[in-house]
Amino acid sequence: MYYLGIDFGTSGARSAVIDETDQLCWQQSIPFPSPMASGPAQRWRTTLFQLIQAIPPRYKAAIARIAINGTSATVLLCDETGTPLTEPLMYSDRCPPDSLAPLANIAPAGHLVLSPSSSLAKLLSWRSHPLFPQARFLLHQADWIAAQLHGRWGISDYHNCLKLGYDPAQRAYPNWFDHDFIAPLRSLLPQALTPGTVVGPPQATLARHLGLPSQTEICAGTTDSIAAFLASPAQGPGEAVTSLGSTLVIKLLSQTRIDQFESGIYSHWFGSAWLVGGASNTGGAVLAHFFTPTELTTLSLQIDPQQNLDLNYYPLLKPGERFPIQDPDLEPRLPSPEADPVTVLQGLLQSMARIEAEGYGKLQALGANPLLRVYTAGGGAQNAAWTVLRQQALGVPVLAAPQTEAAYGTARLARGYFSQQASSFPESLSKMD
Protein backbone atom coordinates (compact mmCIF):
# COMPACT_ATOMS: atom_id res chain seq x y z
CA MET A 1 0.00 0.00 0.00
CA TYR A 2 1.03 3.60 -0.58
CA TYR A 3 0.28 6.84 1.21
CA LEU A 4 -0.10 10.27 -0.38
CA GLY A 5 0.73 13.55 1.31
CA ILE A 6 0.04 16.91 -0.33
CA ASP A 7 1.52 20.19 0.87
CA PHE A 8 -0.06 23.51 -0.06
CA GLY A 9 2.38 26.34 0.61
CA THR A 10 2.58 29.98 -0.36
CA SER A 11 4.44 29.54 -3.64
CA GLY A 12 3.08 26.22 -4.84
CA ALA A 13 1.97 22.71 -3.96
CA ARG A 14 3.89 19.46 -3.64
CA SER A 15 2.95 15.79 -3.45
CA ALA A 16 4.79 12.82 -1.98
CA VAL A 17 3.95 9.12 -2.14
CA ILE A 18 5.55 6.79 0.40
CA ASP A 19 5.30 3.06 1.03
CA GLU A 20 4.71 1.20 4.29
CA THR A 21 8.36 1.69 5.32
CA ASP A 22 8.31 5.47 4.77
CA GLN A 23 10.35 5.09 1.59
CA LEU A 24 9.74 7.99 -0.81
CA CYS A 25 8.40 6.57 -4.06
CA TRP A 26 7.19 9.63 -5.96
CA GLN A 27 7.15 13.38 -5.59
CA GLN A 28 6.14 16.34 -7.69
CA SER A 29 5.76 20.09 -7.30
CA ILE A 30 3.60 22.63 -9.12
CA PRO A 31 4.34 26.35 -8.64
CA PHE A 32 1.55 28.86 -8.38
CA PRO A 33 1.56 31.64 -10.97
CA SER A 34 2.09 35.15 -9.68
CA PRO A 35 -0.32 36.76 -9.95
CA MET A 36 -2.83 33.90 -10.16
CA ALA A 37 -4.94 33.91 -13.32
CA SER A 38 -7.91 32.67 -11.29
CA GLY A 39 -8.78 33.01 -7.61
CA PRO A 40 -6.62 31.16 -5.06
CA ALA A 41 -9.28 28.60 -4.17
CA GLN A 42 -9.86 27.63 -7.79
CA ARG A 43 -6.10 27.36 -8.28
CA TRP A 44 -5.82 25.10 -5.20
CA ARG A 45 -8.52 22.79 -6.55
CA THR A 46 -6.97 22.61 -10.02
CA THR A 47 -3.51 21.95 -8.58
CA LEU A 48 -4.85 19.22 -6.27
CA PHE A 49 -6.28 17.32 -9.22
CA GLN A 50 -3.15 17.85 -11.32
CA LEU A 51 -0.93 16.43 -8.58
CA ILE A 52 -3.11 13.34 -8.17
CA GLN A 53 -3.48 12.74 -11.91
CA ALA A 54 0.30 12.88 -12.36
CA ILE A 55 0.99 9.99 -9.95
CA PRO A 56 2.17 6.89 -11.85
CA PRO A 57 -0.59 4.26 -12.07
CA ARG A 58 1.47 1.61 -10.24
CA TYR A 59 1.38 3.79 -7.12
CA LYS A 60 -2.00 5.43 -7.57
CA ALA A 61 -3.81 2.10 -7.87
CA ALA A 62 -2.68 1.16 -4.35
CA ILE A 63 -3.02 4.45 -2.45
CA ALA A 64 -4.53 3.57 0.90
CA ARG A 65 -4.82 7.01 2.49
CA ILE A 66 -4.38 10.69 1.61
CA ALA A 67 -3.67 13.65 3.91
CA ILE A 68 -3.29 17.34 3.08
CA ASN A 69 -1.61 20.21 4.88
CA GLY A 70 -2.12 23.92 4.37
CA THR A 71 -0.76 27.20 5.65
CA SER A 72 -1.87 27.93 9.20
CA ALA A 73 -4.69 30.50 9.57
CA THR A 74 -5.45 30.63 5.84
CA VAL A 75 -9.26 30.44 5.89
CA LEU A 76 -12.33 30.51 3.66
CA LEU A 77 -15.92 31.46 4.39
CA CYS A 78 -18.20 29.06 2.51
CA ASP A 79 -21.88 28.47 1.82
CA GLU A 80 -23.71 25.18 2.37
CA THR A 81 -22.16 23.65 -0.77
CA GLY A 82 -18.61 24.58 0.24
CA THR A 83 -18.43 27.37 -2.34
CA PRO A 84 -16.29 30.28 -1.08
CA LEU A 85 -18.30 33.44 -0.48
CA THR A 86 -15.20 35.63 -0.50
CA GLU A 87 -11.58 35.39 -1.52
CA PRO A 88 -9.58 33.42 1.09
CA LEU A 89 -7.80 35.36 3.78
CA MET A 90 -4.19 34.19 3.81
CA TYR A 91 -2.06 33.28 6.82
CA SER A 92 -0.37 36.70 6.89
CA ASP A 93 -3.49 38.81 6.31
CA ARG A 94 -4.33 41.03 9.27
CA CYS A 95 -7.79 42.13 10.33
CA PRO A 96 -8.80 45.67 11.32
CA PRO A 97 -8.22 46.30 15.04
CA ASP A 98 -11.85 47.31 15.58
CA SER A 99 -13.03 43.78 14.70
CA LEU A 100 -10.91 42.46 17.57
CA ALA A 101 -11.77 45.05 20.20
CA PRO A 102 -14.76 43.18 21.73
CA LEU A 103 -12.79 39.92 21.70
CA ALA A 104 -10.17 41.41 24.04
CA ASN A 105 -12.84 41.53 26.77
CA ILE A 106 -13.82 37.88 26.24
CA ALA A 107 -10.73 35.82 25.47
CA PRO A 108 -8.13 35.23 28.19
CA ALA A 109 -5.34 37.78 28.26
CA GLY A 110 -2.57 36.89 25.86
CA HIS A 111 -4.62 34.29 23.97
CA LEU A 112 -3.49 33.35 20.48
CA VAL A 113 -6.82 34.41 18.91
CA LEU A 114 -6.12 38.03 19.86
CA SER A 115 -3.59 38.22 17.05
CA PRO A 116 -5.07 40.18 14.11
CA SER A 117 -3.96 37.34 11.82
CA SER A 118 -5.66 34.54 13.79
CA SER A 119 -8.39 32.43 12.20
CA LEU A 120 -10.95 33.68 14.72
CA ALA A 121 -10.06 37.32 14.03
CA LYS A 122 -10.64 36.71 10.33
CA LEU A 123 -14.01 35.09 11.00
CA LEU A 124 -15.05 38.06 13.13
CA SER A 125 -13.94 40.49 10.43
CA TRP A 126 -16.26 38.77 7.94
CA ARG A 127 -19.35 39.53 10.03
CA SER A 128 -19.83 42.80 8.17
CA HIS A 129 -19.53 41.20 4.72
CA PRO A 130 -22.78 41.41 2.72
CA LEU A 131 -22.70 37.67 1.98
CA PHE A 132 -22.08 36.66 5.60
CA PRO A 133 -25.74 35.61 6.16
CA GLN A 134 -25.17 32.84 3.56
CA ALA A 135 -22.16 31.45 5.42
CA ARG A 136 -22.39 27.90 6.74
CA PHE A 137 -18.74 26.89 7.17
CA LEU A 138 -15.47 28.48 8.21
CA LEU A 139 -12.78 26.24 6.73
CA HIS A 140 -9.01 26.27 6.75
CA GLN A 141 -7.10 25.83 3.54
CA ALA A 142 -6.34 22.15 4.28
CA ASP A 143 -9.99 21.50 5.26
CA TRP A 144 -11.41 22.98 2.09
CA ILE A 145 -8.95 21.20 -0.20
CA ALA A 146 -9.52 17.82 1.47
CA ALA A 147 -13.28 18.31 1.17
CA GLN A 148 -12.85 18.60 -2.59
CA LEU A 149 -12.09 14.87 -2.37
CA HIS A 150 -14.33 13.50 0.39
CA GLY A 151 -17.17 16.02 0.02
CA ARG A 152 -17.82 16.42 3.77
CA TRP A 153 -17.82 20.07 4.80
CA GLY A 154 -17.13 21.29 8.30
CA ILE A 155 -14.28 18.86 9.09
CA SER A 156 -10.89 20.05 10.32
CA ASP A 157 -8.11 18.97 12.70
CA TYR A 158 -6.94 20.31 16.03
CA HIS A 159 -3.66 21.61 14.61
CA ASN A 160 -5.37 23.92 12.12
CA CYS A 161 -8.04 24.87 14.66
CA LEU A 162 -5.60 26.14 17.29
CA LYS A 163 -5.66 29.70 15.88
CA LEU A 164 -9.44 29.48 15.74
CA GLY A 165 -9.46 29.15 19.53
CA TYR A 166 -9.73 25.37 19.87
CA ASP A 167 -8.27 24.14 23.18
CA PRO A 168 -6.09 21.05 22.54
CA ALA A 169 -5.90 20.25 26.26
CA GLN A 170 -9.69 20.04 26.61
CA ARG A 171 -10.29 18.72 23.09
CA ALA A 172 -13.02 21.31 22.66
CA TYR A 173 -13.72 24.93 21.84
CA PRO A 174 -13.45 26.88 25.12
CA ASN A 175 -16.39 27.83 27.32
CA TRP A 176 -15.91 31.52 26.61
CA PHE A 177 -17.12 30.80 23.07
CA ASP A 178 -20.60 30.80 24.64
CA HIS A 179 -20.39 34.57 25.07
CA ASP A 180 -23.07 36.42 23.14
CA PHE A 181 -20.46 38.01 20.88
CA ILE A 182 -19.13 34.64 19.64
CA ALA A 183 -21.99 32.18 20.24
CA PRO A 184 -23.83 33.03 16.96
CA LEU A 185 -20.71 31.92 15.07
CA ARG A 186 -20.37 28.50 16.70
CA SER A 187 -22.40 26.80 13.98
CA LEU A 188 -19.76 27.87 11.44
CA LEU A 189 -16.85 26.28 13.32
CA PRO A 190 -15.44 23.03 11.95
CA GLN A 191 -15.23 19.81 13.90
CA ALA A 192 -11.62 19.36 15.04
CA LEU A 193 -10.38 15.78 14.60
CA THR A 194 -7.03 14.29 15.55
CA PRO A 195 -4.71 14.83 12.58
CA GLY A 196 -4.62 11.69 10.45
CA THR A 197 -8.12 10.57 11.45
CA VAL A 198 -9.96 8.95 8.54
CA VAL A 199 -12.80 11.20 7.34
CA GLY A 200 -14.09 9.11 4.44
CA PRO A 201 -13.50 7.87 0.90
CA PRO A 202 -13.24 10.10 -2.16
CA GLN A 203 -16.50 10.87 -3.91
CA ALA A 204 -17.17 8.05 -6.34
CA THR A 205 -17.36 10.08 -9.54
CA LEU A 206 -14.25 12.04 -8.61
CA ALA A 207 -12.34 8.87 -7.71
CA ARG A 208 -13.01 7.45 -11.16
CA HIS A 209 -11.99 10.72 -12.80
CA LEU A 210 -8.71 10.90 -10.88
CA GLY A 211 -7.99 7.19 -11.04
CA LEU A 212 -8.07 6.71 -7.27
CA PRO A 213 -9.19 3.41 -5.73
CA SER A 214 -12.71 3.67 -4.31
CA GLN A 215 -11.44 2.36 -0.97
CA THR A 216 -8.84 5.12 -0.56
CA GLU A 217 -9.35 6.98 2.72
CA ILE A 218 -9.07 10.77 3.04
CA CYS A 219 -7.70 11.86 6.41
CA ALA A 220 -7.85 14.97 8.55
CA GLY A 221 -4.78 17.07 7.82
CA THR A 222 -2.41 19.42 9.61
CA THR A 223 -0.51 22.68 9.08
CA ASP A 224 2.48 23.09 6.81
CA SER A 225 5.01 23.70 9.58
CA ILE A 226 3.86 20.69 11.58
CA ALA A 227 4.05 18.61 8.41
CA ALA A 228 7.68 19.73 8.08
CA PHE A 229 8.29 18.49 11.62
CA LEU A 230 6.65 15.16 10.75
CA ALA A 231 9.04 14.81 7.83
CA SER A 232 12.05 14.95 10.12
CA PRO A 233 13.63 12.31 12.39
CA ALA A 234 12.91 14.50 15.45
CA GLN A 235 10.95 12.59 18.05
CA GLY A 236 12.24 13.39 21.55
CA PRO A 237 12.03 16.40 23.88
CA GLY A 238 14.65 19.00 22.98
CA GLU A 239 14.67 18.11 19.28
CA ALA A 240 13.49 20.80 16.92
CA VAL A 241 12.78 21.60 13.30
CA THR A 242 13.31 24.93 11.61
CA SER A 243 11.42 25.36 8.35
CA LEU A 244 13.27 27.72 6.03
CA GLY A 245 10.69 28.54 3.40
CA SER A 246 9.15 31.88 2.52
CA THR A 247 9.08 32.51 6.27
CA LEU A 248 11.10 31.10 9.16
CA VAL A 249 9.17 28.73 11.43
CA ILE A 250 10.56 26.94 14.47
CA LYS A 251 9.05 23.98 16.31
CA LEU A 252 10.54 22.42 19.47
CA LEU A 253 9.27 19.24 21.09
CA SER A 254 8.72 19.97 24.77
CA GLN A 255 7.16 18.39 27.81
CA THR A 256 5.95 21.84 28.84
CA ARG A 257 3.22 23.77 27.10
CA ILE A 258 4.04 27.43 26.44
CA ASP A 259 1.67 30.09 25.16
CA GLN A 260 2.80 33.70 25.19
CA PHE A 261 0.95 35.99 22.82
CA GLU A 262 3.29 38.95 23.18
CA SER A 263 6.13 36.83 21.85
CA GLY A 264 4.11 35.01 19.18
CA ILE A 265 4.60 31.64 20.95
CA TYR A 266 2.01 28.89 20.95
CA SER A 267 1.84 25.12 21.50
CA HIS A 268 0.31 22.28 19.52
CA TRP A 269 -0.51 18.91 21.03
CA PHE A 270 1.74 16.38 19.33
CA GLY A 271 0.94 12.79 20.27
CA SER A 272 2.58 12.65 23.70
CA ALA A 273 4.15 16.09 24.18
CA TRP A 274 3.83 19.70 23.10
CA LEU A 275 5.19 21.16 19.89
CA VAL A 276 6.02 24.74 20.85
CA GLY A 277 7.25 27.51 18.62
CA GLY A 278 6.37 30.40 16.41
CA ALA A 279 6.74 31.87 12.96
CA SER A 280 8.81 34.88 11.95
CA ASN A 281 8.03 36.96 8.88
CA THR A 282 11.67 36.84 7.87
CA GLY A 283 12.87 34.04 5.60
CA GLY A 284 13.34 33.00 2.03
CA ALA A 285 10.92 35.54 0.60
CA VAL A 286 13.30 38.30 1.67
CA LEU A 287 16.24 36.52 0.05
CA ALA A 288 14.24 36.10 -3.17
CA HIS A 289 13.57 39.83 -3.14
CA PHE A 290 17.30 40.55 -3.35
CA PHE A 291 18.69 37.58 -5.28
CA THR A 292 17.79 35.10 -7.99
CA PRO A 293 18.23 31.37 -7.19
CA THR A 294 21.42 31.31 -9.27
CA GLU A 295 22.82 34.35 -7.44
CA LEU A 296 22.02 32.77 -4.08
CA THR A 297 23.95 29.65 -5.02
CA THR A 298 26.94 31.53 -6.43
CA LEU A 299 27.22 34.18 -3.74
CA SER A 300 26.79 31.69 -0.89
CA LEU A 301 29.99 29.97 -2.00
CA GLN A 302 31.87 33.26 -1.44
CA ILE A 303 30.72 33.73 2.16
CA ASP A 304 33.25 33.38 4.98
CA PRO A 305 31.15 31.92 7.84
CA GLN A 306 33.91 32.68 10.35
CA GLN A 307 33.53 36.42 9.77
CA ASN A 308 30.88 38.05 11.92
CA LEU A 309 29.67 41.12 10.06
CA ASP A 310 27.28 42.19 12.84
CA LEU A 311 25.19 44.26 10.43
CA ASN A 312 22.09 43.89 12.58
CA TYR A 313 19.61 43.71 9.73
CA TYR A 314 16.01 42.76 10.48
CA PRO A 315 15.03 41.25 7.12
CA LEU A 316 11.33 41.87 6.45
CA LEU A 317 9.55 42.71 3.23
CA LYS A 318 7.12 45.02 4.99
CA PRO A 319 6.54 46.31 8.53
CA GLY A 320 5.33 43.79 11.09
CA GLU A 321 6.76 40.79 12.92
CA ARG A 322 5.09 37.80 14.61
CA PHE A 323 7.93 36.01 16.43
CA PRO A 324 10.19 36.08 18.45
CA ILE A 325 8.49 39.40 19.13
CA GLN A 326 4.91 40.32 18.31
CA ASP A 327 5.11 43.80 16.83
CA PRO A 328 2.76 44.68 13.95
CA ASP A 329 4.67 47.92 13.37
CA LEU A 330 8.26 46.65 13.45
CA GLU A 331 10.13 48.33 10.62
CA PRO A 332 12.44 46.31 8.37
CA ARG A 333 16.16 46.95 8.62
CA LEU A 334 17.52 46.13 5.18
CA PRO A 335 20.81 46.60 3.31
CA SER A 336 21.49 49.42 0.91
CA PRO A 337 21.00 48.41 -2.75
CA GLU A 338 24.52 49.69 -3.46
CA ALA A 339 26.20 47.38 -0.93
CA ASP A 340 28.46 44.52 -1.97
CA PRO A 341 26.20 41.51 -2.85
CA VAL A 342 28.25 38.96 -0.87
CA THR A 343 28.21 41.22 2.18
CA VAL A 344 24.47 41.78 1.78
CA LEU A 345 23.75 38.06 1.56
CA GLN A 346 25.96 37.19 4.52
CA GLY A 347 24.41 39.98 6.56
CA LEU A 348 20.92 38.76 5.77
CA LEU A 349 21.75 35.14 6.59
CA GLN A 350 23.47 36.05 9.84
CA SER A 351 20.53 38.22 10.85
CA MET A 352 18.08 35.42 10.14
CA ALA A 353 20.27 33.04 12.16
CA ARG A 354 20.20 35.54 15.02
CA ILE A 355 16.39 35.74 14.89
CA GLU A 356 16.16 31.93 14.89
CA ALA A 357 18.48 31.70 17.91
CA GLU A 358 16.49 34.36 19.76
CA GLY A 359 13.35 32.33 19.10
CA TYR A 360 14.74 29.10 20.55
CA GLY A 361 16.31 31.02 23.42
CA LYS A 362 12.97 32.52 24.34
CA LEU A 363 11.28 29.09 24.35
CA GLN A 364 13.88 27.73 26.75
CA ALA A 365 13.71 30.81 28.98
CA LEU A 366 9.98 30.15 29.36
CA GLY A 367 10.49 26.54 30.41
CA ALA A 368 10.73 24.44 27.25
CA ASN A 369 13.14 21.52 27.17
CA PRO A 370 16.77 22.50 26.44
CA LEU A 371 17.56 22.54 22.74
CA LEU A 372 19.55 19.45 21.73
CA ARG A 373 19.59 19.51 17.94
CA VAL A 374 17.83 21.23 15.06
CA TYR A 375 16.74 19.58 11.84
CA THR A 376 16.19 21.83 8.85
CA ALA A 377 13.33 21.62 6.38
CA GLY A 378 12.45 23.75 3.37
CA GLY A 379 14.55 25.19 0.59
CA GLY A 380 17.01 26.87 2.95
CA ALA A 381 18.22 23.46 4.12
CA GLN A 382 20.34 23.24 0.94
CA ASN A 383 22.41 26.33 1.74
CA ALA A 384 25.65 25.10 3.38
CA ALA A 385 26.84 28.58 4.38
CA TRP A 386 23.53 29.35 6.07
CA THR A 387 23.76 26.05 7.96
CA VAL A 388 27.19 26.96 9.34
CA LEU A 389 26.00 30.42 10.39
CA ARG A 390 22.94 28.96 12.08
CA GLN A 391 24.97 26.35 13.96
CA GLN A 392 27.25 29.08 15.26
CA ALA A 393 24.26 31.09 16.47
CA LEU A 394 22.39 28.15 18.00
CA GLY A 395 25.30 26.31 19.60
CA VAL A 396 23.85 22.86 18.84
CA PRO A 397 24.11 20.50 15.86
CA VAL A 398 22.14 21.72 12.84
CA LEU A 399 21.27 18.85 10.52
CA ALA A 400 19.50 18.67 7.19
CA ALA A 401 16.55 16.34 7.58
CA PRO A 402 16.85 13.34 5.23
CA GLN A 403 13.46 14.39 3.91
CA THR A 404 12.84 18.12 3.98
CA GLU A 405 9.49 18.46 2.23
CA ALA A 406 6.28 18.98 4.20
CA ALA A 407 4.49 16.75 1.68
CA TYR A 408 6.61 13.82 2.88
CA GLY A 409 5.62 14.56 6.49
CA THR A 410 1.97 14.69 5.48
CA ALA A 411 2.34 11.30 3.78
CA ARG A 412 3.69 9.97 7.10
CA LEU A 413 0.61 11.45 8.76
CA ALA A 414 -1.58 9.56 6.29
CA ARG A 415 0.34 6.38 7.07
CA GLY A 416 -0.63 6.68 10.72
CA TYR A 417 2.12 8.65 12.45
CA PHE A 418 -0.01 9.61 15.43
CA SER A 419 -1.54 6.15 15.82
CA GLN A 420 2.03 4.93 16.39
CA GLN A 421 2.67 7.52 19.12
CA ALA A 422 1.19 7.86 22.58
CA SER A 423 -2.19 9.45 22.03
CA SER A 424 -3.37 10.18 25.56
CA PHE A 425 -2.76 13.43 27.39
CA PRO A 426 -0.50 13.36 30.46
CA GLU A 427 -2.29 13.46 33.80
CA SER A 428 -1.00 16.95 34.46
CA LEU A 429 -0.70 19.44 31.63
CA SER A 430 1.73 22.21 32.47
CA LYS A 431 1.23 25.62 30.94
CA MET A 432 3.34 28.70 31.40
CA ASP A 433 1.94 32.14 30.81
Image (cartoon, rainbow, N blue to C red):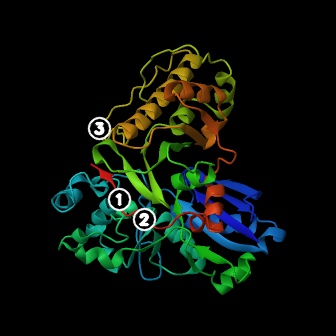
**Can you identify the residue that label 2 sits on?**
425
Mark 1, other Cα within 10 Å: few <14 / some 14–19 / many ≥20: few
Residue 260 can be seen, yes or no: yes
- 183 vs 235, nearest the viewer: 235
Q: Is residue 290 above or below residue 320?
A: above
Q: Residue lying farthest right?
A: 58
Mark 3, other Cα within 10 Å: few <14 / some 14–19 / many ≥20: few
Tell me the CA gap for discs 1 and 2.
Answer: 8 Å
Residue 343: assigned label: none
Mark 1 vs 3, N-terminal side: 3
Q: Position of residue 176 (x, y in %)?
A: 22, 69
Q: Position of residue 235 (x, y in %)?
A: 57, 51
Q: Is residue 313 above or below residue 22?
A: above
**Can you identify the residue that label 3 sits on?**
329
Q: Residue lying farthest front?
A: 427
**Can you identify the residue that label 1 sits on?**
429
Residue type highlighted by circle 1: Leu
Q: Position of residue 335 (x, y in %)?
A: 46, 21
- 271 vs 175, nearest the viewer: 271
Secondary structure of the residue carrying tag 3 is: loop
Residue under the image location 48 percent in, 46 percent down: 252
Q: Quadrant of residue 377 in the image?
A: top right
**Mark 1 vs mark 3: in front:** 1
State if disc 2 and disc 1 touch (CB < 8 Å): yes
